[in-house]
Image (cartoon, rainbow, N blue to C red):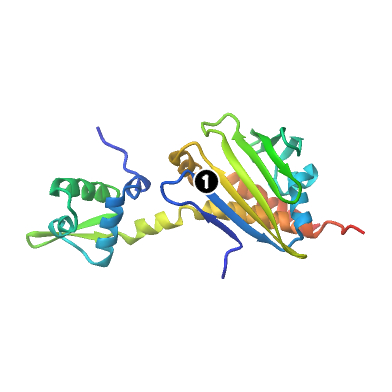
Amino acid sequence: MEQKTKVTAQEGKQEVRISRVFGLPLESLFKAYVDPKIVEQWMGTKVIKLECKTHGSYHFETTDPKGNKHGFNGTIHEFEPNQKITRTFEMENTTFPVQLEFLEFQDINENNSKLEMLIVFKSVSDRDNLLKLPFAFGLNRAHDKLEELLSN
Amino acid sequence: MKLRRDVFQAIADPTRRTIISLVALQAMTPGAIAEEFDFSRQTISKHIQILTECEILRQEQTGREIHYHLNPEKLKAIADFIEPYRKTWDERFDTLEAIMKNQPKRT
């Protein structure tokens, strides 16, 4: 079976490519990145600030199952509705350097759209360390949220 | 001092990747491996040593000869290392899709 979400991390390169085809119209996919209420639901995070514009910035705060708070923030460099978002991403209070993200949204047809993400890291080893992170709490939260939604 | 041996460090080197692909075809003696390269035997020995310390290669003594075999489980670990990361995104995007499908349609 073809995987819906594809991740490529070429050896020796300090970047990761993520692509995904959604059974959603382009506007609907893009809205999920812009509307703070929706971002909170699927990212499993609290949105403290989300300014969707060039020179804007964002600040998210996630609480892990132990009750510890983790901050994420970044600056939005390019913002073109239904087309692209270029932004930085930083995990606060960690040793991971800031990363650069290029998000491109594409129309496939009226019911389908595609997202391509290119993430550029400070170094190859920073990338590899991030890929190896056991994203356990993120995974659990995504699970919980999905179950919550489906049981509503 | 004991150096930390990481499989990812092991496969980062092109010579070591070539050694892996050679040994993947058949078990080889260190001499046979060295013959495939223009580097000195010592250089190749060093690479073999690193691969052995990472448990990507396994030594087997047959009479007076040592043969190197590939440890497929270790290689599988490398191939799979990105999977949890992919899965995280996959599930996150599934959630996004489910939420947006439940959104009221614009009229």
Picture residue at 13% right of the left edge, 49% below the top:
B41
Q: Secondary structure at mark 1?
A: loop
Foreground residue, B16 or A146? B16
Picture residue at 48% right of the left edge, 42% below the top:
A127
Picture residue at 16% right of the left edge, 55% below the top:
B34
Residue A10 lies, in percent from the top left, at 45, 52
Query: Which of the chains bears the disc numbered 1?
Result: A
Can I make out residue B55 in this image?
Answer: no
Quadrant containing the N terminus of chain A in the rendered view: bottom right
Count of marks, rendered view: 1
Task: Identify the amino acid type marked 1.
Answer: Pro
Quadrant containing the C terminus of chain A in the rendered view: bottom right
Residue B57: image quadrant is bottom left
Outermost residue toward the right in this view: B107
Foreground residue, A83 or A115? A83
Residue A15 lies, in percent from the top left, at 51, 46
Residue A69 lies, in percent from the top left, at 65, 33
Residue A71 lies, in percent from the top left, at 65, 33
Residue B35: image quadrant is bottom left
Residue B50's place in the image compared with A47, above or below, is below
Can I make out residue B4 in this image?
Answer: yes
* In-image side of A118 versus B51 (left or right): right
Residue A90: image quadrant is top right
* In-image side of A7 versus B92 (left or right): left
